[in-house]
Amino acid sequence: MREDSTQAPVVGPSTGSDGELVVAARSGRREAFDVLTERYFGMVYAIAYARLTHRDSAEDLAQEVFLRAYLLLDRLENPQTFCAWIGRITRNLATDWQRHSTRVARILSPEPLDTS
């Protein structure tokens, strides 16, 4: 089987700088964002758990943080600051959840299921 030589493979969490991975993810390479998720999930979960003190809530918040980061990746001005950016998203979202005592995702509006 021949490998595609136009793209360097993204192998694991230690492969590539944050900036390189952000650029690759912005260009549509989902595996690059997967590496960023692997790299920072522990940090995001730790911040979420420290703020919310409930395992399920921390897991839910971490999922929403990475969804937001993926959807808003183009807004990150300096790709090298991904770690600080994702940390800020986590702290801000945890504060919102504490303030409003809610775990409702606010990114996507629910779409009704087609029941036909």
Image (cartoon, grey):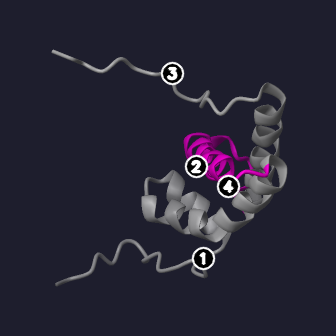
Q: Which region shows up in magenta?
A: 53-80
The answer to the question of whether label 4 and label 2 lie on touching residues, with beta carbons closer than 8 A, is: no
In this rendering, position of residue 19 left or right of residue 46? left
Q: Nearer the viewer, mark 4 or mark 2?
A: 4
Tell me the quarter of the image containing the C terminus. Answer: top left
Distance between the alpha carbons at the discs numbered 2 and 3: 16 Å
Q: Could you say whether the residue bearing mark 2 is in a helix, strand or loop?
A: helix
Secondary structure type for disc 4: helix
- The residue tagged 2 is 63
Q: Quadrant of residue 35?
A: bottom right
Of labels 1 and 4, earlier in sequence is 1
Q: Amino acid at mark 3?
A: Ser
Residue at which label 4 appears: 55
Q: Front-most of 33 and 89?
A: 89
**Side of 61 relative to 11 (left or right):** right
Marks 1 and 2, how far apart in space? 23 Å
Disc 1 target residue: 16
Specify which label sits upstream in the sequence, 3 or 4.
4
Q: Which dot, 1 or 4, sits closer to the camera?
A: 4
Q: Secondary structure at mark 3?
A: loop
Task: Residue under label 3, please give it.
Answer: 109
* Amino acid type assigned to the residue bearing label 1 in the image: Gly
- Residue at (44, 58) in percent of width and height: 30
Query: Which residue is found at the position 61% from the left and 67% from the top?
Result: 20
